[in-house]
Amino acid sequence: MDLKLGAKRIKDLAASEGLSVNKLLIDELGLNKSVVDNMIKGSMPAADKLDAIANRFNVTTDYLLGKSDIRSPLEIPEILKNVPVAFHRGEFEDLTQDEVDQLARIAAGLKATRVQQLGPN
């Protein structure tokens, strides 16, 4: 975990939208600027504050904590939602969204084949 990198990422995300850190944290999210200042000093922000920032920019909290370079959470298609824990354990964290979508198409094809062979159920 690299909180200094996380603070820099928050600053960069704000700047990419023409916002100052103060404008983002105080005006938009109702947070205190000390969130970023404390991260620079090595202090972990509260989960709810980190989550608010992550949601604002549609990035993962791991990205904001410097634990991962993957910015956006994968959108898991419905057909893959019940795939046991592999996604939740992060085993597919390096997949792109296109690759996840391809897995969904494969799963849908397998399911369609099974239905044709065995009937519904």
Image (spheres, grey):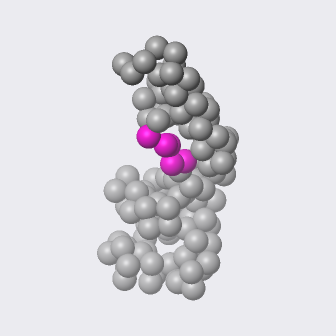
Q: Position of residue 67 (x, y in %)?
A: 60, 46
Can residue 73 be seen here? yes
In the image, is residue 4 part of the stretch drawn in magenta? no
In the rendered image, the residue lying farthest to the top is 118
- Residue 104 appears left or right of 27: right
- Vertical order, 34 against 99 (above or below): below
106 or 120: nearer the viewer? 120
In the rendered structure, which segment of residues is drawn in magenta?
74-78
Return the residue nearer the eye: 23 or 93.
93
In the image, what residue occupies the spot 57% across and 80% down?
17
Question: How far across and how far down the image is residue 103, in percent?
Answer: 61, 35
Between 120 and 60, the residue placed more toward the observer is 120
Can see residue 89?
A: no
Residue displayed at 58% across by 31% down = 109
Considering the whole magenta stretch, tell me its main secondary structure: loop
**Left or right relative to 82: residue 11:** right
Choose between 27 and 78: the one closer to the eye: 78
Q: Locate residue 1, reporting x and y percent.
A: 59, 46
The image quarter containing residue 10 is bottom right
The residue sitting at 44% across, 84% down in the picture is 23
Q: Position of residue 44 (x, y in %)?
A: 46, 53
Residue beneath the point at 36% across and 19% down:
121
